[in-house]
Each structure stands twice: as C-alpha cells, then as structure tokens.
Image: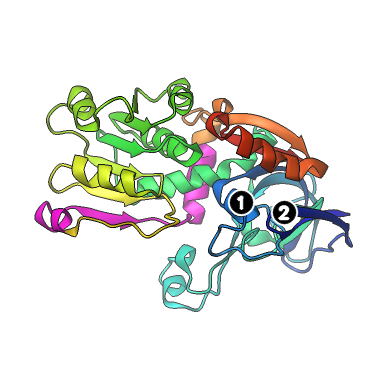
C-alpha cells in the first residue's frame, strides 16, 4: 500500500509499505479522507515545536473498517468511522483521574506517532468512533476539530443563555463559535481581520461577525451585548494581539478560555487579571464524551460544516495541497486529501 511521509520540512515522499494486519483489539481502517489542520501546516514548514520529521501525518481523518482483529466488539467491516488520535499511558496522575487527554506521556497520532496518511491504518478499537450512516467522509474527518471546540466550550461549564465572544474566525474559531451556539449560548460574536472568514462565519449562522481591523471591539460588544458585554471569551488565534483583546474587553470576573496555540510566548497583563478577578483557562484536545457530542452536533445540523469545506486534493498531490493553502491562506478554511 502507499504511504506518505513528511521526510523533512516541505518534502513529502511516497513509499510502498506492507498493508497492516490488525492485532487483537485493533481494527484496520481503509482511509478515505484526511483533513489538513494548522498543526499539520506548521509541521510541513518545520515550525511546529512538538512535531519532528520524519512523520506520517494525518490526525483528522475518516474511513471504513476493512478488517477487525480478535476481541473487537461493536465494530464490523464496512462501518464508517473516525478516530480519537490520542495515545496515552493510563498510569500517570491525569490518566488515573480521568484526564487522559492531558496525559503526561501523551502522543498524538499523526504528530508524535504514525498517522493516517496511508491507504490503510491499523488502530486500537477503543479509539474508534462509529459515524452515523448519513454522515459524509468529509464530515467524519471534521469530527476531531469540532471536538476541540466542544471541549473548549465545555471548560466554561454550561453556556446556555450566555453571550459568548470568540476571537479568531479560522476553522477552530468558527467551529468553537458554532459549538457555543449549538450548546445553547444566547448570542455569539466572532472576530477576525479577514472579511472572508467572517463571511463564512455568517454563512454558518453566527449572528455577530466583527472585523477588528476596522471596528473597535469594545464598541462592538456594547452594541451587540449591551454594557455587560460578553459573559465568556474564547481566544482561538494564539497571538499577542488577541490575548490582549480578550483581557482588555473582559468585564470583571470573566472567564477566558485559551484555545489558540501560541508559537511565541505572549506577555499577559497579570495586573488586570488580578485586579478584575479574571480567569485564564487552558484547553487541550478532548475526551470521548466530547467526540460523541461533536458527532451529535454535526448529525443534528447544529454545526454546519459545508461552508468550511474549501478544496480536495488526491492523495498523491499531498504537497500541492500545502502549496495551495500557503498561496490562498486568506480564502481557505479546510482542505481535504482524498484516498
């Protein structure tokens, strides 16, 4: 079978390898779709601090089960599935207390462990999530980023009836905003400096889409939500400017969830954090329940994925997909690799 390897930054090679045989407790997945995310792009250009070459990428993916190994229950050949790409130790303090998603030895399939950029992929059945029959492979490959949003919103507790501000309208910001709305938020505002991304957010049903390059954020918040502004804020960019915006725009006692991955260490005004009793809350990945919620939100139409689907590339054009994203960064949301 054919496998794609990111051999070094900006160099993907294809090689023939043996088709895996599923061991006990494993299933063999015929990979159909792979989604390219921000971390994949950083890795491709050699700029991800935790992904080293060579690596077989692919952590957002879907496919159908080709074979099942011994002692696998509830899954059968022909089932459409996606996968939670977390490999955990099960023995550290977080794992033993139910927080395996922040395992001390966490490895992510496609990042620190071999990923799904190959025609067939063997994986532990316990990581496999069955998809509804009417869910497309594209939607299945996007369950992972939706689950990121589900977990991030979940860090706030119950958002029903709240006014929520999301900073950043890229794929994760868009999906986080949609999740907040889908989980009962009263109103959601999303911000960005790209009119294209803000229009996509509007197409997905986000009521307030604000370009902070041309509009003052506090003024927009007052206009949309009134003087009490947002009840909760999610930073989905990972940049100095947006964490500054979050802290400055927050009313006293507000929770700020940090979703974005910071390539450079930001400077945070801890004086304001202390004086206003703000809470900065980190979020990383997801748990099994977040995946289940993500599937439900997609299945019931409370999260609309179609406006985010930008372009497809055949498997052998993996490098061209990265070049397309780089050349069309301002007008690209989610690019898929088709196998």
Label 1 element class: helix
Q: Nearer the viewer, residue 189 or 96?
A: 189
**Splitting the image into 4 quarters, where does residue 208 fall?**
top left
Find the magenta span and give its range: 271-296
Kindly identify the residue that appears in the image at 62 percent across and 65 percent down: 112
Residue 193 is situated, as x and y percent measured from the top left of the image, at 39, 31
Residue farthest toward the left in the current orientation of the protein: 275
Tell me: 261 left or right of 126. Answer: left
**Splitting the image into 4 quarters, where does residue 177 fall?**
top left
Residue occupied by mark 1: 40
Q: Nearer the viewer, residue 127 or 324?
A: 324
**Splitting the image into 4 quarters, where does residue 63 fall?**
top right
Residue occupied by mark 2: 116
Q: Earlier in the sequence, mark 1 or mark 2?
A: 1
Q: Is residue 291 magenta?
A: yes
Kindly identify the residue that appears in the image at 87 percent across and 59 percent down: 19
Tell me: 212 left or right of 117. Answer: left
Kindly identify the residue that appears in the image at 44 percent across and 74 percent down: 96
Instruction: Assess disc 2: are there few (<14), some (14-19) or many (≥20) residues with their C-alpha within 10 Å of its C-alpha.
Output: many
């Amino acid at each position: 079978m054919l496998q794609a390897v990111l051999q070094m930054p900006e160099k993907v090679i294809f090689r023939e390898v043996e088709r895996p045989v599923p061991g006990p407790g494993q299933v063999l997945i015929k990979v159909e779709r792979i989604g390219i995310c921000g971390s994949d792009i950083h890795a491709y250009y050699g700029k991800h601090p935790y992904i080293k070459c060579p690596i077989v990428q692919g952590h957002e993916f879907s496919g159908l089960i080709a074979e099942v190994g011994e002692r696998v229950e509830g899954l059968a050949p022909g089932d459409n599935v996606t996968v939670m790409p977390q490999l955990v130790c099960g023995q550290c303090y977080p794992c033993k207390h139910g927080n395996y998603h922040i395992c001390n030895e966490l490895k992510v399939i496609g990042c620190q462990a071999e990923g799904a950029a190959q025609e067939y992929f063997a994986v532990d059945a316990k990581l496999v999530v069955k998809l509804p029959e009417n869910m497309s492979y594209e939607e299945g490959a996007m369950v992972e980023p939706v689950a990121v949003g589900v977990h991030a919103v979940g860090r706030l507790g119950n958002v029903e009836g709240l006014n929520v501000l999301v900073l950043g309208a890229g794929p994760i910001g868009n999906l986080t905003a949609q999740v907040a709305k889908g989980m009962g938020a009263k109103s959601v505002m999303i911000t960005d400096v790209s009119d294209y991304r803000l229009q996509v957010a509007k197409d997905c049903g986000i009521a307030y889409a604000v370009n902070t390059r041309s509009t003052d954020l506090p003024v927009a918040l007052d206009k949309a939500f009134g003087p009490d502004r947002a009840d909760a804020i999610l930073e989905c960019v990972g940049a100095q400017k947006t964490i500054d915006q979050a802290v400055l725009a927050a009313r006293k006692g507000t929770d700020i969830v940090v979703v974005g991955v910071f390539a450079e260490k930001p400077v945070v005004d801890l004086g304001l954090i202390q004086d206003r009793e703000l809470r900065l809350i980190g979020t990383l990945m997801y748990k099994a329940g977040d995946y289940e919620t993500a599937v439900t939100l997609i299945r019931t139409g409370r999260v609309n994925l179609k406006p985010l689907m930008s372009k497809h590339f055949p498997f052998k054009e993996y490098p061209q997909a990265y070049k397309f994203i780089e050349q069309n960064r301002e007008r690209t949301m989610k690019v898929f690799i088709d196998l």
